[in-house]
Image (spheres, rainbow, N blue to C red):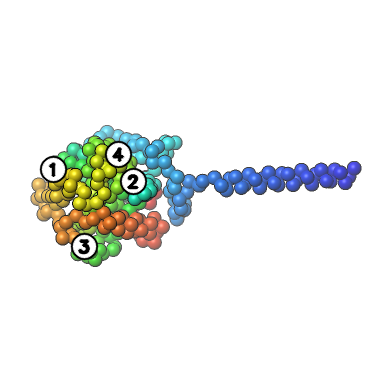
């Protein structure tokens, strides 16, 4: 009887151990939501579903307190700069809209605030506006950073402007602040703003009717004639009404190819990775 009882107990124990092992195995196969662990306990998501992201406004537009956060499907705040994945696959990238086309409020990601919400820029305590409407959807490529300690030998040795890379999206849609769109890059403009390098990636949303027709800089001129010149001239001249000098452009004052744009994106993504891993001092930038 004692032998039978011992055998029964042993079998039960073995069954329990196997069941626990199976549970651990199933747990270990579950996809993790952590892309990598940032230092000091900060994490960011790998399996963030961009289709579930929604802008959530706090405060009244055109006030100093106005902020537009991004929230995920569970209502949790995420950073449009750090948490939205850069790549969407097959040469497609995510683009976060800061300034909708045909508007003039100078909205931008608050790189020094937790969750980096979108706010209206200020100067001497006053809200900033462009002197005229911007004619394209404008915003940033997430998970990119123009390193202010790195000189670009292609562009007069200019240093980065300490911000994410800007995108000018030329499609027909009037997007909203905080929209996350899938775009494909087409060209790059090397704007030099008061000595700082401020890349402008020209792109088009995948859902635009002409998206399949444009795949490089020459296609833009063919299907959107005059647009590249208009973008360059707009960003060259927008500070002149405030009494400031015109911005300049490197690379021969011409838009670079898609291949070059992809190079810029890759390099600035690598700089961002160094930033969030704290291989480069963050200064006042928020990594949360």
Asked if residue 21 can be seen in this view, the reply is: yes
**Label 2 to label 4, Cα distance in Å?**
13 Å
Q: Position of residue 279 (x, y in %)?
A: 39, 61
In the rendered view, would you say 265 is above or below 113?
below
The mark found on residue 155 in the picture is 3
Instruction: Name the foreground residue: 99 vs 168.
Output: 168
> Given this view, does label 1 or label 3 mark the residue nearer the observer?
3
Residue 72, image x and y in percent? 41, 38
State which tag comes first along the sequence, 3 or 2: 2
What element does badge 3 sit on? loop
**Residue 196 higher or lower than 88, as above or below:** below
Q: Residues within 10 Å of mark 4 (few under 14, many from 20)?
A: some
Work out whether residue 257 or residue 167 is closer to the camera in this orientation and state it: 257
Residue drawn at 29 percent across, 47 percent down: 184
Earlier in the chain: of badge 1 and badge 2, it is 2
- Tell me which label, 2 or 4, sits earlier in the chain: 2
> Mark 1 against mark 4, which lies toward the viewer?
4
Q: Spatial distance from mark 1 to mark 3, Cα to Cα? A: 27 Å
Q: Is residue 1 left or right of residue 255?
A: right
Label 1 environment density (alpha carbons within 10 Å; few <14, some 14–19, many ≥20): some
Give the Cα separation between the discs numbered 3 and 2: 26 Å
Q: Is 269 or 228 nearer to us in this picture?
A: 228
160 vs 71: above or below? below
For the residues labelled 4 and 3, the Cα–Cα distance comes to 33 Å
Distance from label 1 to label 2 (Cα)?
Answer: 28 Å
Secondary structure at numbered mark 2: strand
What residue did someone put label 2 on? 94
Q: Earlier in the sequence, mark 1 or mark 4?
A: 1
Q: Circle 4 — which element?
A: loop
Mark 1 highlights which residue? 131
Q: Residue 183, image x and y in percent? A: 30, 45
């Amino acid at each position: 009887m004692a032998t039978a009882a011992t055998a029964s107990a042993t079998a039960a124990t073995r069954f329990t151990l196997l069941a626990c092992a199976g549970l651990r195995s199933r747990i270990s196969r579950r996809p993790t939501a952590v892309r990598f662990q940032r230092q000091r306990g900060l994490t960011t998501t790998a399996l963030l579903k961009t289709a579930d992201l929604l802008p959530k406004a706090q405060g009244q537009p055109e006030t100093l307190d106005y902020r537009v956060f991004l929230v995920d499907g569970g209502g949790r705040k995420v950073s449009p700069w750090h948490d939205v994945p850069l790549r969407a696959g097959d040469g497609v990238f995510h683009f976060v809209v800061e300034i909708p086309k045909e508007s003039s409020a100078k909205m931008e990601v608050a790189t020094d605030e937790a969750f980096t919400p979108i706010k209206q820029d200020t100067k001497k305590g006053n809200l900033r506006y462009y002197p005229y409407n911007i004619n394209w959807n404008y915003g940033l490529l997430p998970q990119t950073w123009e390193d202010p300690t790195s000189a670009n030998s292609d562009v007069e040795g200019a240093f980065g402007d300490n911000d994410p890379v800007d995108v000018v999206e030329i499609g027909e849609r009037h997007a909203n602040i905080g929209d996350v769109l899938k775009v494909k890059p087409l060209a790059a403009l090397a704007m030099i703003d008061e000595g700082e390098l401020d890349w402008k990636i020209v792109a088009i949303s995948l859902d635009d009717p002409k998206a399949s027709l444009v795949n490089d800089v020459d296609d833009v001129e063919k299907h959107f004639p005059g647009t590249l010149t208009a973008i360059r001239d707009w960003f060259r001249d927008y500070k002149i009404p405030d009494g400031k000098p015109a911005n300049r452009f490197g690379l021969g004052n011409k838009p670079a190819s898609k291949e070059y744009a992809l190079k810029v994106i890759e390099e600035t993504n690598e700089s961002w990775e160094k930033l969030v891993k704290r291989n480069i001092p963050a200064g006042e930038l928020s990594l949360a």
